[in-house]
Image (cartoon, rainbow, N blue to C red):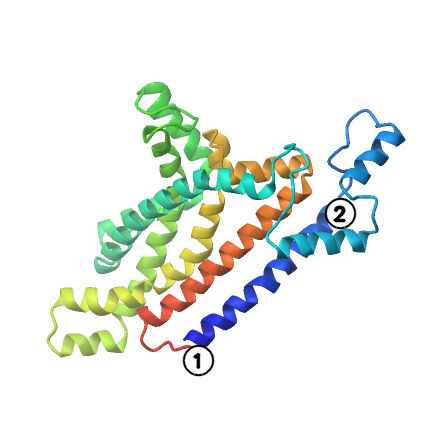
Amino acid sequence: MLSYIIRRLLIIIPMALLVVTVTWVLIRMAPGNFYSSEKKLPAAVEANIKKKYGLDKPVIQQYGIMMWNIVRGDFGDSLKYEGQSVNEIIRRHFPYSATIGVLAYILALILGLAAGIVAALKQNSAFDYGSMSLAMLGLSVPNFVIGPILVLIFSLWLYIFPPARWGGISSIILPVITLGAIYAAYIARLTRAGMLEVMRSDYIRTARAKGLSEWKVLLKHAVRGGLIPVVSFTGPALAALLAGTVVVERVFAIPGLGNIFIQSVLNRDEPLILGIVAFLSILIMIFNLLVDVSYAFLDPRIRYE
């Protein structure tokens, strides 16, 4: 197990650098630049800007400087936010996204696991059909529809929660529900499918034949195997949630990382784009590693060399 983890950790750095390289090439291939405007700049001013940011150097040299800085963990300064480093911007805005993301996924796990397990145990019952229909509705309705509906009902009609902005516990309830709804739907369906498959397996029949109570069979054997699809989904889902969900942050005016990333793309802020992409790619790979390691604890048949 330890050797497997070390190998996976060693792969993270070159993979993240590959992602950054592809992103850098795509940015350079796109038309325009961060100092473009409706009115063309004088040639002398444009030359000074290029010299200040090292854009007058050969492309290979620019790429080498960029990669060396990233390897050292220094993403440089933002081109649009004067005097602010990319590291500082990520540190400042990531906690907002992380708070909303973690709470949304906890809510999704509680609702999704409960609905999925009960639906599997009561297959073809009214609860099964009703919960899975509700889950399908949750998958079908996008965040940019759920968010405004919640704001309309709970903010503008009932005056229970504030419609937007960050401030206090009451301001995060609607974003958490909006963000967690679709993930709860995914988890409910994955849990039901995983539990149904496990409940028909040989080792569950053997456990029942030994005389174990239904609760012991369920909690000790069935749930562990049935959660594997949910765990597989958790890695990339949680990484995306922690990095920020743009739609929810836009709807509720949350100053999270997703909102900043979209703004950096619109501004053609190359260092900030590369910094967020590198941060997100590393986050996803780390969570995927944790998911793979957790398989061995959930299913004793899985072993890593």
Tell me the tag on residue 305. Answer: 1
Q: Is residue 131 left or right of residue 72?
A: left
Query: Mark 2 near mark 1, Cβ–Cβ under 8 Å?
Result: no
| Residue that mark 2 sits on | 28
Residue occupying the point 33% across, 63% down: 194
Q: Residue furthest right?
A: 43
Which element is circle 1 on?
Answer: loop
* Observer-nearest of 111 and 86: 86
Q: Percent x, y for residue 219?
A: 20, 64
Q: Tell me the kind of residue under disc 2.
A: Arg
Task: Pick whichever of labels 2 and 1 is earlier in the sequence.
Answer: 2
Q: Which mark is residue 263?
A: none
* Crowd around label 2: few <14 · some 14–19 · many ≥20 (10 Å): few
* Quarter holding residue 260: top right
The residue drawn where x is 52% and y is 40% is 257
In front of the other: 45 or 253: 45
Amino acid marked by disc 1? Glu
Q: Position of residue 280 (x, y in %)?
A: 54, 51
- Against 21, residue 256 (above or below) is above
Q: How many marks?
A: 2
Q: x, y percentage for residue 34? A: 73, 36
Is label 2 in a helix, a strand or a loop?
helix
Above or below residue 238? Residue 161 is above
Residue 31 in view, yes or no: yes
**Residue 146 coordinates in the image, percent (x, y):** 41, 34
Label 2, label 1: how far apart the Cα atoms are? 42 Å
**Residue at 23% from the left image edge and 49% from the top image edge:** 127
Query: Is residue 150 depicted above or below 122 in this figure?
Result: above
On-image quarter of the C terminus: bottom left
- Report whether residue 245 is seen: no
**The N terminus lies in which quarter of the figure?**
bottom left
